Amino acid sequence: MGTVITFANQKGGVGKTTTVVNLGASIAETGRTVLLVDFDSQGNLSSSVGADRSRNGIYQVISGDVSAEEAIQETPQPDMSIIIGGSDLTGASVELVNEDRREYYLREALAPVVDRFDYIFIDSPPSLGLLTLNALVAANHVVIPLQCEYFALEGLTQLLQNIKRVQTSFNKELELFGILFTMYDKRTRLADDVVQEVIGYFGKRVFRTIIPRNIRLAEAPSHGIPVNLYDPACVGTRSYQKLSEEVLNRVKTTTAR
Ligand SMILES: Nc1ncnc2c1ncn2[C@@H]1O[C@H](COP(=O)(O)OP(=O)(O)OP(=O)(O)O)[C@@H](O)[C@H]1O
Ligand SMILES: [Mg+2]
């Protein structure tokens, strides 16, 4: 089965989507196949790869209108595909509330295609609602991106409690795969303090690669391509490539256990 990783943090703007697209592209560059799933009504991930937003997406898949297979689109990055998300997902969380097994919709929707890819990356919205819950139930790993700033840790306890709840009630396989620092600014001492505090608490779960603030990472989405295709030599590209090596090694050691 492919490795399914959900990127979650209910705090907005911490780099979830940026990480999904660029880590996905870096892994696809190594020849592994990657499927991105945009499970956010903002649809930022879909725009980041210039996807056709008029086509069927994950909402139609969980509604049973189309198969996951039919919703897959190619992206500008070879070996990386996407199932798009968008505003119709806002309705999904309301519609699912009264359904039995409402936590399992995404997992079941993706089940027919998980074996086709080496990696499946799920982007989730900035909330701890039913969509994020579905994204956690569908995954075997979760990555928490954290912005290097004072309020970064706010809400982390609540997120970890949600992950525990998913582990005990819905999905025993779910593992905290790693904590990723994003938008690091070496000019601020505060960033270092935050990083040290989190390492003190989570130890090896924190990725050694820290993603710096890099304007190219913010520019690439408006061109509908991942940063490695936009500027192959920039710091943003190199950091996500470094992170991809770390992720691939970590997957190896976790499966070897
Ligand atoms: N390392 C970085 N350097 C510079 N800009 C960045 C970096 N990472 C992300 N950004 C920019 O910061 C903004 C927020 O990032 P992103 O959309 O990835 O966060 P998010 O957690 O997905 O947000 P949301 O919670 O709204 O979905 C975007 O404009 C993005 O381009
Ligand atoms: Mg996002």
Image (cartoon, grey):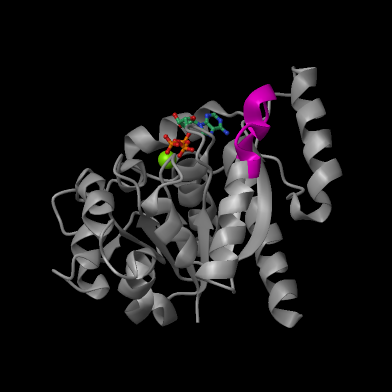
Q: Is residue 182 left or right of residue 32?
A: right
Q: x, y percentage for residue 161?
A: 61, 51
Image coords of residue 27 (percent x, y):
55, 61
Q: How many numbered marks are there?
A: 0
Q: Residue at x 25, y 45 (%)?
A: 90
Choose between 225 and 126: the one closer to the eye. Answer: 126
Please state which of residues 60 and 218 is positioned toward the viewer in this rendering: 60
**57 with respect to 10 (left or right):** left
Magenta-span inclusion, residue 148: yes
Residues rendered magenta in the picture: 146-157
Q: Residue at x 52, y 48 (%)?
A: 8
Examine the structure image and report whether residue 170 is included in the region drawn in magenta: no
Q: Position of residue 3 (x, y in %)?
A: 54, 72
Q: Which residue is at 41% across, 77% downward? A: 114
**Residue 50, placed above or below residue 190:** below
Question: Which image quarter is the C terminus in?
Answer: bottom right
Residue 31 visible (yes or no): no
Q: In the drawing, does residue 93 fall left or right of residue 248?
A: left
23 up-or-down from 65: above or below:
above
Decide which of 75, 55 is in the foreground and name it.
Answer: 55
Residue 55 appears in the figure: yes
Q: Position of residue 138 (x, y in %)?
A: 45, 67
Q: Say which residue appears at 30% left-offset and 72% top-offset.
A: 109
- Judged left or right of residue 250, residue 136 is left
Quadrant housing residue 236: top right
Vertical arrangement, residue 217 with respect to residue 76, above or below: above
**Residue 86 higher or lower than 63, as above or below:** above
Q: In terms of image quadrants, where is residue 65?
A: bottom left
